[in-house]
Amino acid sequence: MKRIGALLLVAAIGVTACSAGRARPDRMSGPASYESPSGIAGPAGPGLYRLSQAEVSPEENVASALDDPTAKGLPKPLVDPKRIIDGGPPPDGIPALAEATFARANAIDWLIPEEPVLSLTLNGETRAYPVQILIFHEIVNDTVGGVPVAVTYCPLCNSAIAYDRRVAGRVVTFGTSGKLLYSNLVMYDRQTRSLWPQLAGQAVAGVLTGVRLTAYPVQTVAWQDWLADNPRAWVLSNQTGYDRDYGLNPYSGYDKANSQPFDLDGPADPGLPPKTRVVAFPGPEPIAITLDALTARHVIPLHIADRDVVAWALPGLRSALDTPDLEAGRTIAASGAFDPHWHGQLLHFIAQGTQFVDAETGSHWTVLGRAVAGPARGARLQPILYFDTFWFAWAAYQPHTRIVR
């Protein structure tokens, strides 16, 4: 079976005439260099800009795990290569973005208030990546706060995370391999053609086998909430150079808790229905909270690996994987996870309307962890690495997870 059927692959994901044949802008050579945050490389149309990007390393003349994970000269793969299956499209059939265009948040008029966007903050710079675009491209190679990153989203697992593209002395760019491991997006780097499952954050085959990526937390929140916090920040534009029906969901009906995942390669973990949404924390003793439980309680304090964490949820977000039209998706909740300390003081939170209020200072905090009223106004809580994803996917990679129901 191919990914969500041939109609999805041909009509929704296949490269179109406007992109076929053009030179890949992310294939560059030379030493790595880093631009200052928010540097503008140049205009790209009315209200659109190309932002400064880190220079990437040249492609290497090495054996390609993309062609054969067991090719002569490559390290032994970390997983059975037979488990890395064909997901339908060929390599780059789902085209990752590089040198994308951006617009200021207050100039965006094509997102509805409840629509999901991915929020990433690095070195004081925040950007938004609308899920309606990522659902068709899955990877954006970008540079945020001077850090070269890959912002990734796997629709089959509903998982979003950002990774540092500085890898083993290189600055790499990532593309989609067209392959899946436990139904999860398998990326490849264009420099060595090593294979990187998104939820693993580690090369499982190729020259870089065993190398781990540095991960940065990404929040999936409603556009209206992100815009209120970041009215002048940069937002990934829908002017991508590709002809896609942005705003439509090619995975219609996929977001049903009891429905079967696509090509999981074995039964789903029985601990929860396969597509139960969970807020999951990696580590030696991984923990997962069901999004329903977090939404019902609003705020859940945790102690993970000797560290205080607060997880919270704010209803009002549309599911991008429910109905064919994203605007009509069912209402779920956005989540967040943060270090609950401010000026060395441990804060305890309760939900109040669309904000979270700490008992110690009475300050009001948004779902994105920014204080908008009270003594802490202007402060931001430090985000904690977590994954907002489907249970089946998390359990496949973290089978010993403790579930907080």
Image (tube, rainbow, N blue to C red):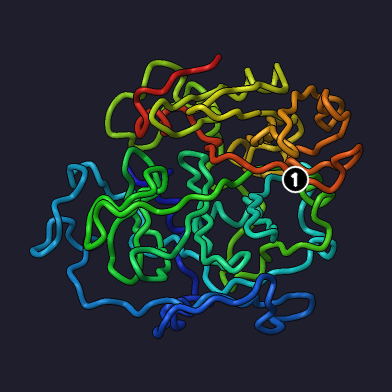
- Residue 2 at x, y percent in the picture: 35, 46
Residue 80 placement, left or right of 93 = left
The answer, for residue 98, to whether it is visible in the render is yes
Question: Residue drawn at (17%, 69%), measured in percent from left and top?
Answer: 63
The residue lying toward the viewer, choosing from 210 and 51, is: 210
Q: Name the residue under label 1.
A: 380
Whether residue 5 is visible here, answered yes or no, is no
Nearest the viewer among 118 and 109 is 118
Q: Position of residue 22 (x, y in %)?
A: 46, 82
Quarter the N terminus occupies: top left
Q: Relative to 381, say whether 126 is above or below.
A: below
Relative depth, front residue between 289 and 93: 289
Residue occupying the point 52% across, 66% down:
148
- Residue kind at label 1, given as amino acid type: Arg
Residue 27 x %, y %: 41, 79
Q: Nearer the viewer, residue 292 or 346?
A: 346
The image shows residue 387, relative to residue 223, as above or below, that is: above
Q: Does 34 sit left or right of 37 as displayed?
A: left
Residue lying at the far right in this picture: please name it: 374
